Amino acid sequence: MTILAPLPDSVSTVSNSARPRDLINRRLSVAPMMDWTTSDARVFHRLMSRHTLLYTEMVTTGALIHGDRERFLRYDTSEHPIALQLGGSNPRELAECARMAEDWGYDEVNLNVGCPSDRVQNNMIGACLMAHPQLVAECLSEMQAATRLPVTIKHRLGIDDLDSFEHLHRFVETVKQSGCHSFTIHARKAILDGLSPKENREIPPLIYERVYRIKALFPELEVIINGGIKTLDEAQAHLKHVDGVMIGREAYQNPYPILSQADAVIFGDNHAIADRLAIAEQFIPYLERRIAEGAPLYAVVKHLLGLFHGQRGGRQFRRHLSENGHQREAGVATFREALRFVTPNSMPDED
Ligand SMILES: Cc1cc2nc3c(=O)[nH]c(=O)nc-3n(C[C@H](O)[C@H](O)[C@H](O)COP(=O)(O)O)c2cc1C
């Protein structure tokens, strides 16, 4: 049973007109994904699209304030435009971390109100905050007071029995009073008791229509839709109803069809597109640098395993890296060997 928090009476309102104009284009973004959208993955994604907005994994305020800040905030300059996603519910700490995001040169800071994991619920982080819209508004308000960066939110349709459209409407109405104007909505509710985070991305049904209704009711807000979107054709269809589309798993597991076409199809920028093999080769100087810094090969190249999804030799490429990439002597040569499987005419088609 989740308790509905009262409507706010004391959330300080930040006037959008007093803030610098939000220049980030969110028509297409790659979702924040723990362990997946690391800096290495984002550098790779950026080789395929110049304009798609890239999100970090969620970083908790505790990790930034008490942990190895550099480890969580470091990124490559090629990654811009890039948004830092924060997990937390203490307005003062979130404000401190929003300031860090600005100091480190991020382009946006986003609050996670969608993650259903037990580990984060215990600390009042993520989707459980959907029961506390006033607290969320206070958090976003403090964050905006602390930084000139756009401050955005990513949330669910609801949680547990707080799953009516009315609750979602009330949540957005309350949170918008903070001055936050960009809402990314994962179009399914989260079930906090009994479902794993993975199940929570598959089992509750997607209801896109509710996200469209939020946009229709709040035309002044930027509304981004997320959940289950697999192609740019689907993205285009959603863009008839909302301002932006966020893609998670498909953009990571099969990135090339989406990201290599995104600039032309979504952002209207028709530049030459490198083929998959050329993208892999363009990644090599960065890979050399990371290995020189001491990064294990596999930790970096595992994010490229989906590059040749469905292509001739793609399976051997993945197998070669999975079998050899963990060895102590594995290095750029191992990666180049794997690429030989996908070089045209070098190997039979088994994929
Ligand atoms: C491995 C993994 C990790 C995730 N980590 C986060 C996270 O850190 N923050 C967040 O807001 N959502 C996280 N999500 C949820 C995604 O951002 C996205 O909302 C969800 O996968 C639905 O989009 P999709 O169907 O396009 O994948 C994660 C999803 C996956 C698959």
Image: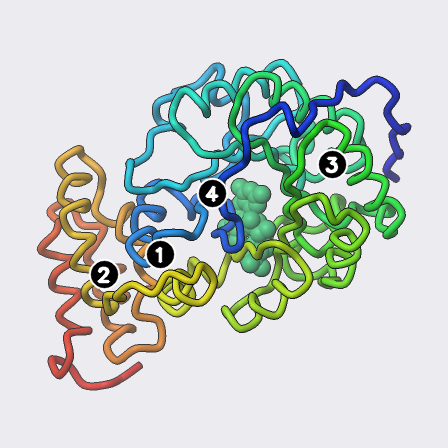
Place of residue 350 in the rendered image (x, y in percent of width and height, measured from the top left): 27, 84
> At 28% across and 54% down in the image, what residue appears?
47
> At 76% across and 24% down in the image, what residue appears?
135
Disc 3/disc 1 C-alpha distance (Å): 34 Å
Q: Residue furthest front?
A: 17
Label of residue 49 in the image? 1
- Of the two numbered discs 4 and 2 on the same chain, state the one appearing first in sequence: 4
Under circle 3, the secondary element is helix
User: Residue 137's image quarter?
Assistant: top right
Q: Amino acid at mark 1?
A: Ser
Count the marks: how many?
4
- Asked if residue 130 is positioned above or below residue 223 in the image, the reply reads above
- Of the two numbered discs 1 and 2 on the same chain, state the one appearing first in sequence: 1
- Of the two numbered discs 4 and 1 on the same chain, state the one appearing first in sequence: 1
Q: In screen coordinates, is 6 left or right of 245?
A: right
Q: Amino acid at mark 2?
A: Ile
Place of residue 3 in the rendered image (x, y in percent of width and height, measured from the top left): 88, 33
What residue is disc 4 on? Answer: 55
What residue is disc 2 on? Answer: 279
Disc 4/disc 2 C-alpha distance (Å): 20 Å
Disc 3/disc 4 C-alpha distance (Å): 21 Å
Disc 2/disc 3 C-alpha distance (Å): 40 Å
What residue is disc 3 on? Answer: 128
Q: Amino acid at mark 3?
A: Cys
Q: In screen coordinates, is 269 left or right of 329?
A: right
User: Residue 129's image quarter?
Assistant: top right
**In this rendering, the label closer to the viewer, 2 or 3:** 2
Under circle 1, the secondary element is loop
**In this rendering, the label closer to the viewer, 4 or 1:** 1
Density class for disc 4 (Cα within 10 Å; few <14, some 14-19, many ≥20) is many
Q: Is mark 4 within 8 Å of ligand 1?
A: yes
